[in-house]
Image: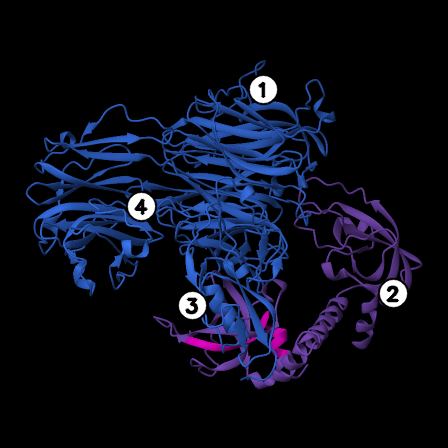
Chain colours: A purple, B blue
Amino acid sequence: MSEPIAEAVGRSALGFTGTVMAVEAEPEPAPGSAATAVVQVDAVLHAPPELRQLAGQNVRVQLDPAGAPLQAGDRAAFFVDPVSFGRELTAAEVTRLPVSAVESRLAAAAAGGAGPVADIEQQLASARLRSHAATAEVVLVGRVAGLANAGLGQFSEHDPDWWLATIEVAHVVRGADPGPTVEVLYANSKDVAWRNSPKPRASQEGLWLLHATEGELAAAARFVIPDPEDYQPTTRVDELREGG
Amino acid sequence: MLRIINIIPQSRSGESRQDSEPNLAVNPARPTDMVATAFTPATSGSNAPIYITQDGGYTWETRQVLPGNGMFGTKDVTVGFATAGGTLYAGILHGITGDLHILRTANFAGSTVMGDLVTRPKVDQPWVVAVTATVGGAAQDRVYVGNEDGASRPQSASVDLSQNAAIAPAPAGFSTVRLEQRSTIFKDGPPIRLAVHADGTVYAAYQRWASGTFPDLTVDVVVSRDDGWGAGASSFQALADPAAPAGDGVVGRRVATGVFIRFNATMGQERLGGDLTIAVDPADSGNAWIAWCDRVGNPPGVPPQQGTDWTLHLRRSTDRGRNWSADLLTITNAKNPSLAVNGRGVVGLLYQQFTGTTWDTHVQLSRDAWATPARTLDLHTATASVPSLDFFPYLGDYVRLITVGNDFYGVFCGNNTPSTASFPNGVIYQRNANWATGTLLSTDGITPVAASIDPFCFRLTEDALHLLAATDAGGLWHTIRFDDQSWQTFFGDVKGVESNDPGYVAAVGAAGVRDELHALAVSDSGSLWHTIRHHDGSWQPSFGDVKAVHSNDPGYIAAASGAGVDDDLHVLAVTDVGGLWHTIRHRDGSWQPFFGDVKAVHPDDPGHVMAVDCADVSGDLHVVVETDNGLVWHTIRHPDGSWQPFFGNVKAVESNDPGFVTVVACAGVEQTASAPPALLVEVPDVLELRGAVALKMIRDAGLVPVISGVNSGTAWVATQHPAGGARVTLGSTVSIFLRTGPQP
């Protein structure tokens, strides 16, 4: 991950090549403030799903004061974080690379390959998984053998509605072996507060990242999986191993 | 007039999230400033967005100013503007921790994260109401945040309040007042709603979970009241139940007892359980309204526990909450009631109703406490099965209706499929959509986007037609046609209510500026006079001599016209020598210091002007004049003060000639999706341009580009109109063909 583009992708939510259409100075510049460049997007490098069709659009880029000055007609690879959506997107510049740094990737993507930075995004995802796994008490591969209400009650619309999943352990990747089966608390609620917490299904197989319970939950089970990343497809187990 | 707007900005056209549970704040000091919220996450960063508009809701943008950006933005969030000063307050549940944060900003449109005033765990549904009181000449923001306070359980219906929240550092005077005085089974219901009157009366409504076993609950609907802004050690004690046997004598008047709620039951993919709203009449703090939902068990005779309904109940009090009516209205399978009362005592009820196949959003307006059928406006209808539920709440545990003066403002969430059938009263979309196919389109205007849940804002004004008439005796008379189709029963003598007499009125002009009528009177001496009819029916006490406040004299004025644009009054005056002059009365009451010579800023001269009219069209001032040769000319003054550089000959662009024109009139008429424009636009010449640039040019022209194939020629792009120039209907599809070879 030492490539400048890898670092740029990792630090930004959106990356694109674009042509500067205009540079607008702040009317009353504050210390450390910089100009805004109106940049027409030529090609998207990486983006959240709702911004993948940005090509041809203008993005107002609040330029990093430490970056090299730009003028109309300049082209660059911009790496930004969106800050405001309106008729146009306004984004804060994180870093900038010359277009030459991404041209070969764009050409490969245009030839029918994956996204221009798909390999980097995969590496970043693996790194995030390894980082999250490091916070888990036990990481294991297993299959859901049973689901039951934990009996802890649900008293408001935002309560988690705790249930217990019994997981048959196939393989312990990390941590102490919990035995042939392990009971894990999970939030069964579909409330906005818990929607993305894993919801085990009967006979579901996967990679489970188990966290130690605390407080009143400890009486119900040793482990809990509240984080959306706590369940992964079994195929991702190799990404943990590669990370050591 | 009803105007509905999908508030998702154009640059978010690619999103297909469940942006549910809306809220809305309107700045009473400047109602074109609004803030809306929903379960919308920021694309990146640690702060969640609000939606803002500064043009009355025509265009919306986001600002990432709420701390705690979770998977869906914040959790519960509500907002409120103080009635003066423009300070915005928010109550949120942090998107990561779930903790309550009470927030403040003096600049709602800025990008600085809102300042934290209070942070506390285990709180549900913070509900913000803010007003401004004047004490000793100083403005003080009274801010109330109703909430179900976990720390106070089992008596958890509470309100955090501050008597002066605008300036002081955190906690800015906030403290927590427990409303619930009775026992509960372990807590109160999530909604604690507030209605604050300018005289210091504060009503609080909450749902006491009196008995039952979760989720089957027996509930009391309770109202507490305070008569001094909620200040003091024993606040919200002004109302109590009657003594036994009529009641229990405890503080907190029970409007209904023993109603049944199956908490978290579902209907049309939505959960149920906590629907409550209260409102107070701004003209009389003794008039209060309440609505809630429960299960009555219909069909008749079926016990609530065995029913499937969710029934909305509406009641009122005319004695400061001591006594409440029976149900004035019930609506089966409705949720999210929100009540508001405008300055004329009209009560608005916004709600969403499940029909079995669709979710329908309505607002009812009643002038007579539903003694006669209310005027019902259908805001939105769409299938309840699309999109599939992502999380609860599907539409939201609440909506919001508020009033500023006589206007109603509201926000609701619903299926965003672009279908005219879904919006019987029209709608405006900022996000890209193909209304012909009913398809949302991404930022490129091409890629289809799945239907999802979006927030919609609306403004409902009780517009009235004001009529001014000059008589052959030189009099000036006024009457009104109200929005209920009735007419004021008499002509009012305008001169009779003014202290001075402008003389024989030879011509008149009129304009609505916000909620005031501006009247222009041209006298037979060639002078121009101005007066105002205020929203309360009173008139400015004397005619103002318009020429007297200008440094130049345009000469003998023969006719005048006015139009309100962005809260300013624009006046056009025609002189007896055919001149055309313009001036502005600004919103602060000051006048532009000189009459501007309109002809002088146009290189062409349409000739001797005989008549004029003007109108606001999307923030531009449009001016039409008739000349002594029977022609009609048109020009525009833009918001930046510039004018269209020529007078356009209107007859020259029409296919037929109506003949010699003697009088002109014009009006700006809103165009919504249900009345699509049929304007012709020119296809831009995109030959030789790269694909992305060509796409943008086509879109900017108001056309929809579709990539239909590849181009084997020498240009980067070819279209079915190779060199552009063709005139096609706005919104037409333009096929483009992309070159695949090397750059020509």
Q: Chain of mark 2?
A: A
Q: What's the CA distance linking mark 2 and mark 3?
A: 74 Å
Q: What's the CA distance linking mark 4 and mark 3?
A: 30 Å
Q: Is residue A239 above or below residue B55?
A: below
Question: Which amino acid does the dot numbered 2 rest on?
Answer: Ala
Q: Is residue B264 left or right of residue B419?
A: right
Q: Are marks 2 and 4 in contact (CB under 8 Å)?
A: no
The residue at which mark 2 appears reads as A176
The residue at which mark 4 appears reads as B667
Task: Find residue B248 and name its label.
Answer: 1
At a point 29% along the width and 61% down the height, the residue shown is B640
Dot 3: few (<14), some (14–19), or many (≥20) neighbours within 10 Å?
few
Front-lying residue, A227 or B686:
B686
Which circle's residue, 4 or 3, is located before the other in the chain? 4
Which circle's residue, 1 or 3, is located before the other in the chain? 1
Q: Position of residue B125 (x, y in %)?
A: 58, 43
Q: Chain of mark 4?
A: B
Stretch of the chain drawn in magenta:
A7-22
Question: Which amino acid does the dot numbered 4 rest on?
Answer: Ala
Give the quadrant of the N terminus of chain B: top left
Dot 4: few (<14), some (14–19), or many (≥20) neighbours within 10 Å?
few
The residue at which mark 3 appears reads as B725
Callout 1 and callout 3 share a chain: yes
Dot 2: few (<14), some (14–19), or many (≥20) neighbours within 10 Å?
few
Question: Which amino acid does the dot numbered 3 rest on?
Answer: Gly
Q: Secondary structure at mark 1?
A: loop
Q: Are marks 1 and 3 in contact (CB under 8 Å)?
A: no
Front position among marks 2 and 4:
4
Front-lying residue, B320 or B677:
B677
Q: Is residue A19 magenta?
A: yes
Front position among marks 2 and 3:
3
